[in-house]
Amino acid sequence: MATMASAPSNARTEASSAQPGLLREIRQFWQTFFVAAFNPYHPEQHYMRGPGPACRAKETAPTSH
């Protein structure tokens, strides 16, 4: 009676289970990259950088004591 030798079945499943994890990590990286690179909101364009014209007008207004 002849027997056939084959690779252990768990070696094949380990290789195939590692690939979806790797693909998931690659997909997550690119998704995070695109969200960060192409995010249309830039808060640095919206915050005030100092006192506005109203503050300057108050400072230069004559005060009567």
Image (cartoon, rainbow, N blue to C red):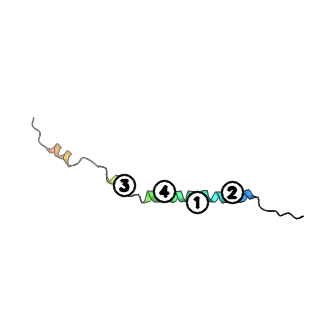
Q: Nearer the viewer, mark 3 or mark 2?
A: 2
Q: Earlier in the sequence, mark 4 or mark 3?
A: 4
- In terms of image quadrants, where is residue 8? bottom right
Residue placed farthest to the front in the image?
1
Amino acid, disc 4: Thr
Task: Please tell me how crowded label 3 is: few (under 14), some (14-19), or many (20+) other residues with Cα within 10 Å.
Answer: few
Task: Please tell me how crowded label 4 is: few (under 14), some (14-19), or many (20+) other residues with Cα within 10 Å.
Answer: few
What residue is pinned by disc 3? 42
Secondary structure, mark 3, is loop
Secondary structure, mark 1, is helix
What residue is pinned by disc 4? 32
Marks 1 and 3, how far apart at CA = 31 Å
Q: Nearer the viewer, residue 61 or 20?
A: 20
Residue at (43% x, 59% y) in the render: 37
Q: Which mark is residue 23?
A: 1
Task: Please tell me how crowded label 1 is: few (under 14), some (14-19), or many (20+) other residues with Cα within 10 Å.
Answer: few
